[in-house]
Amino acid sequence: MISFTRIIYISFLVVLGHAIIDGSFKSYVLGFVPLWGSHSGFLLLQKYQEIINIFGIKDKIIRLVNDNGLNNINAFKDLVIPGFEQYFTEDDNDDSNDEDSGNSQFLTVESILAIPTLELNEILIELKHSHLCLNVRDLAVLNELVALLSLLAEVTTTTQRDNSPSISLVAPSILAIYFDLKNEKNNIQHTTTLCNALISSLLSRFGGLLEQLEIDVNETGIEFKKKNQFYDLYKDPVFLFTLFLDGMFKLNWITGSFLPDAAKERICARIKKLIFDNGVIIEYTKEASVPVDIEPVQEEQVHGAESSSPSALKRKRLFSNIHNNQKYSKKTKSIDSNNYIKEEISRHLYASNNDNMILLKPTASNSYNTLAKLATKYLCIPATTATVERVFSQSGFLCRAHRARMSRKTLQQLTLLKCNCET
């Protein structure tokens, strides 16, 4: 996870590493690097690579998460590792604090609506702000506003929580918000323009993910312009199969959705296959002699291929029937040897425990050896850059106005000590 900011006219790049160790979520500040000159994408990429090389973790990085600054996107757009950005930011160059500010405004409106209207208006009149008194239309507009933004506000808060999976919140949140906005569009009277804008923004950024869920992104009739740096990014299968590893979701977020039944069956089958394929990879990735692709080859296809070409005919051999049986038994063995992964998938799917961290518990490896490895590998991916912002906040506390002469190196060292000491 990377980002940069200015602290009293001093610019820094932050690189965090996230991992699950012994079933616990850990975040470490790998680099808090002062930046000089233009903050170009080339400079950010160079600093990132220096930090990664120092720790020797290039081959251990699963995903890269960066904030939505244009220079950050330019810096890492050519990396093999995909990344994904903060949610629901209207403009690519918006300040990262705008999201928190918007959420605070929503909570303020929600709190105001919780006060009985007569009581609220009496208070306003007493304070000599009668011009702010709410009439019937005002209340209707504010209630519609809250209805439209409530799920977005909730996901903004939920995805920033610590010590629990957040990557698994992305797909079900987007799916729920999409269907909620479609439903509200049919019920609202005063905020139709806002509703259309929200749907358009959602499709612009997360349309790729909705396509993976077999949703026609044009079905609403609302025009939108694809934000290419995000749209295809959310087609990453990680947004689908990580939910199965989260005991709270598994496949329930699909089966309980408003998707058509046929689509539900196909998506569930695809997710289980993704889990199986990644399970095979994680089990055999260190064994170069074992192929990653172990899809069974039908015997009829083999014979058909041999008989279709004269050059494919082979010389008869003594005891050829025995050799053929041995060859087939080896194929069967390579396939059957992975049945335990399918059994783990089935046991986890139908288990009654819905603890979102069930596969991260120390005892999980006894029953879910492969799934526990997958959960440890993928559930550490954060859904937002909230932890980066906390590092910047700590730096702001250290570098106050009365300590403005603090050198960049001192601030760098104090920040690393402060943040890593608390992990």
Image (cartoon, rainbow, N blue to C red):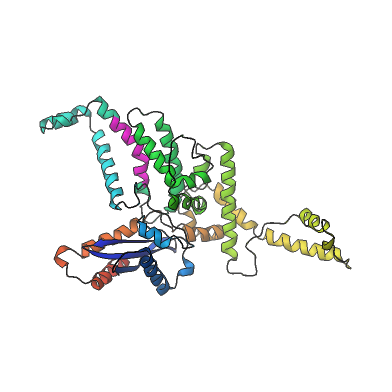
Labels in figure, total: 0
Q: Position of residue 150 (x, y in %)?
A: 34, 39
Q: Is residue 335 visible?
A: yes
Q: Quadrant of residue 26?
A: bottom left
Q: Position of residue 140 (x, y in %)?
A: 29, 28
User: Can you say which quadrant of the picture contains the C terminus?
Assistant: bottom left
Q: Residue at x 36, y 43 (%)?
A: 152
Asked whether 144 falls inside the magenta stretch, the response is yes
Asked whether 270 falls inside the magenta stretch, the response is no
Q: Considering depth in this image, is 159 or 192 the residue closer to the camera?
A: 192
Q: Position of residue 337 (x, y in %)?
A: 66, 61
- 219 sits to left or right of 17: right
Q: Is residue 173 visible?
A: no
Most common SS among magenta residues = helix
Q: Considering depth in this image, is 218 or 368 the residue closer to the camera?
A: 218
Q: For the magenta stretch, what is the residue range?
A: 141-155
User: Can you say which quadrant of the picture contains the N terminus?
Assistant: bottom left
Q: Residue at x 76, y 62 (%)?
A: 329
Q: Position of residue 63 (x, y in %)?
A: 46, 60
Q: Quadrant of residue 298?
A: bottom right
